[in-house]
Image: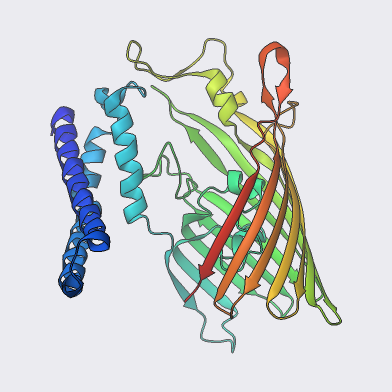
């Protein structure tokens, strides 16, 4: 199929989805304004039918086929062109509909009472650091630390993992991963190389004080017109947690984690790589650019204090910082986060948090300013 044919069919399907969305909105508006009270059952069936049609069309594999046919075509050569913008929006919505966060199989050994040796195959959380091990239902603050968010976008990857519980206090894990994660901008659906990334982690659990170390080694591919550029991708991390119990208040904890490594820097890519345009639809290194400079040394850490107040209230304070290029000044990210969790029961909680963010933006004359992008978050969460 030619790219222009794929694009026309894609836009036709998008227009049909838009019509169905409009029908759904009209039915809901009519239900709130003019619908007779006796029409509730019929209207519920109508809305259920439209919602089913929207889901069926939104997850239709044909969308993936059409997007695949358009990938790399001349229609998308200019990122600012209307066709390229339309395809980006459609791809983002399609992947939101069909994205599967976790799908894995775990084989447990039959020769130990607690299945101390486990082998996992599929898509799972990258076994690195303390934050990545914890699900969103357990986090004390809505936002993860900046370092973890940047270094592990999507938090998950495809691969295999071997876990060993050597004693009640010592556990290790070793994994082999595709390396691109599940939120790769350049390669959202494919692994560009046969090379795999490797992680290793060892954890010591003492009860009142726990500690662990993690290592990640692999490669990052930056796509260009012609030969792609491969750079080292490494991370080293250490984390520790201390726990206590206060009379009349409850349990509390201090959590520390540090990250260091080498990673592709988006600012370096923007500086060293010429972006494609309509007049020149190629993506190349600028003359004289050193491809090894696309990646930079990074450093980040956080410290968080959590304290329960009785059985239903919890307070958390965290400071975290991330430097995407340790050789460059005025690019650090710093944040104070404050949060309160109110628990209705073991499954439901309400969270209020405030993030006071400090970043620096380079302006005219070499001056730097803080964009004042602080954030309030209100979150109601229920888990099943």
Residue 6: percent from the left, percent from the top? Answer: 16, 35
Front-most of 346 and 75? 346
Looking at the image, which residue is at 47% across and 44% down?
Answer: 195
Q: Can residue 7 be spotted in the picture? A: yes
Looking at the image, which residue is at 60% across and 79% down?
Answer: 116
Quarter the N terminus occupies: top left
Looking at the image, is 257 positioned above or below residue 135?
above
Looking at the image, is 171 positioned above or below residue 74?
below
Residue 151: percent from the left, percent from the top? Answer: 60, 45
Image side of residue 26 versus residue 220, left or right:
left
Looking at the image, is 6 positioned above or below residue 108?
above
Residue 337: percent from the left, percent from the top? Answer: 71, 52
Image side of residue 148 versus residue 243, left or right:
left
Residue 155: percent from the left, percent from the top? Answer: 53, 54
Residue sitting at the far right = 247
Looking at the image, which residue is at 63% across and 46% down?
Answer: 375
Q: Can residue 206 be spotted in the picture? A: no
Front-most of 254 and 300? 254
Image side of residue 167 versus residue 208, left or right:
left
Image side of residue 169 versus residue 265, left or right:
right
């Amino acid at each position: 199929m030619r790219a222009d044919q794929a694009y026309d069919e894609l836009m036709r399907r998008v227009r049909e989805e838009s019509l169905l969305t409009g029908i759904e909105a009209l039915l809901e508006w009519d239900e709130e304004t003019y619908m007779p009270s006796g029409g509730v059952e019929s209207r519920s069936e109508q809305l259920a039918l439209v919602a089913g049609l929207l889901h069926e069309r939104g997850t239709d594999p044909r969308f993936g086929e059409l997007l695949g046919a358009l990938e790399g075509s001349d229609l998308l050569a200019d990122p600012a062109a209307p066709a390229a913008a339309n395809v980006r929006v459609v791809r983002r919505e399609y992947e939101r509909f069909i994205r599967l966060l976790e799908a894995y199989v775990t084989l447990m050994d039959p020769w130990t009472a607690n299945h101390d040796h486990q082998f996992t195959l599929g898509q799972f959380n990258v076994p690195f650091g303390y934050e990545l091990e914890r699900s969103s239902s357990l986090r004390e603050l809505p936002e993860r630390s900046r370092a973890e968010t940047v270094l592990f976008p999507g938090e998950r990857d495809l691969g295999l993992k071997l876990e060993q519980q050597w004693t009640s206090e010592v556990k290790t894990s070793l994994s082999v991963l595709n390396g691109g994660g599940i939120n790769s901008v350049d390669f959202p659906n494919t692994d560009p190389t046969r090379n795999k990334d490797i992680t290793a982690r060892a954890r010591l659990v003492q009860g009142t004080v726990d500690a662990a170390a993690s290592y990640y080694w692999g490669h990052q591919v930056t796509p260009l017109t012609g030969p792609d550029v491969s750079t080292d991708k490494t991370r080293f991390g250490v984390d520790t947690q201390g726990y206590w119990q206060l009379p009349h208040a409850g349990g509390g904890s201090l959590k520390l984690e540090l990250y260091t490594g080498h990673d592709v820097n988006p600012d370096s890519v923007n500086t060293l790589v010429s972006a494609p345009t309509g007049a020149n639809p190629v993506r190349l290194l600028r003359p004289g650019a050193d491809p090894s400079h696309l990646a930079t040394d990074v450093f980040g850490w956080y410290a968080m204090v959590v304290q329960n107040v009785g059985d239903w209230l919890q307070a958390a304070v965290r400071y975290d910082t991330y430097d995407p290029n340790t050789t460059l000044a005025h690019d650090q990210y710093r944040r104070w986060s404050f949060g309160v969790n109110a628990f209705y029961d073991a499954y439901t909680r309400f969270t209020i948090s405030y993030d006071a963010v400090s970043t620096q933006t380079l302006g005219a004359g070499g001056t730097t300013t803080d964009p004042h992008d602080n954030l309030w978050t209100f979150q109601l969460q229920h888990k099943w």
